[in-house]
Amino acid sequence: MFPIRDHEPSARFPFLTLGLIGLNVWVFFLELTSPDLEGFIRTWALVPNTLDIADPASLAPVLTSQFLHGGFAHILFNMWYLWIFGDNVEGHFGHGKFLLFYLTSGSIAALSQLFFLLGSDIPMLGASGAVAGVLGAYLALFPHHRVDALVPLGFFLARTTLPAGAVLFFWFITQLFNGTASLAAVGAHTGGIAYAAHIGGFVFGWGIAKLLRKPSSSPWVVP
């Protein structure tokens, strides 16, 4: 199931969502044009065995790694999901709080994946965890919003409109299933998709949005 767009526009212009997309694209360009790609990745990505709690500078990649990507498909999918779901979440939280929420979601997601990679020299990178936080918040805040999605039917794709809750719950269950299967098949200390980061970011985003949800965001009207 692949979302195309949501039907409900944000009440505020999504400055931060657009800015984050632009920043991710710019960093990806720097990454592609770097004369030493491996060195660039090693410097800015989160490499578990280089972390030292006693050295705050070594913790900077928890943030910087959120703006690196492993390829065109990686950044395309992340930015597409951020574009579709980020504006409403930004509109709910406000620009400044949304930025803090986004970066914190990405950091919590990175730490969730780090738990399975302690001592590893495999670089962790990507906005997936932060975007997963946005998806979790969207599910908590706007489960009844309508989302156009492509649904596979055999060899064909059918376009349909579904509640956001159904689309995002399906996404989350897919991450749980794939993450469990990935750990069982190849173990935690191999490269690939950081499913634990997706799950951690999503759960954090959902929980924070539930905790801070304004009464006016409820879809029900109580007389």
Image (cartoon, grey):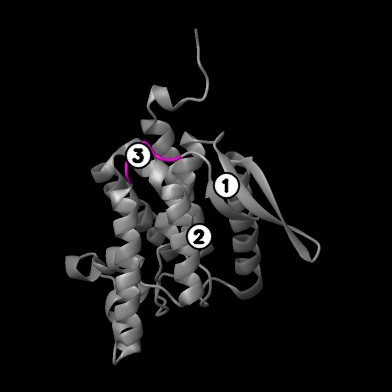
Residue toward you, 163 or 56: 163
Instruction: Find residue 65 and report its horizontal and vertical position in percent.
Output: 33, 69
Residue 27 lies left or right of residue 113; in this view the side is left
Asked whether residue 198 is drawn in magenta, I would say no
Residue on which the image places disc 2 = 196
Give the CA distance from mark 3 to mark 1.
Answer: 19 Å
- Please rate how many residues cluster around mark 3, counting C-alpha atoms within 10 Å: few if below 14, some from 14 to 19, many from 20: some
Mark 2 and mark 3 lie on one chain; the one further toward the N terminus is 3
Q: Is residue 8 above or below residue 68?
A: above
Residue under pointer 1: 168
Residue located beneath label 3 in the image: 91
Q: Position of residue 124 (x, y in %)?
A: 40, 72
In this rendering, does residue 196 appear at all? yes
Write the residue at 32% across / 64% down: 22
**Side (left or right) of 172 relative to 206:** right
67 or 199: which is nearer to us? 67
144 vs 188: above or below = above
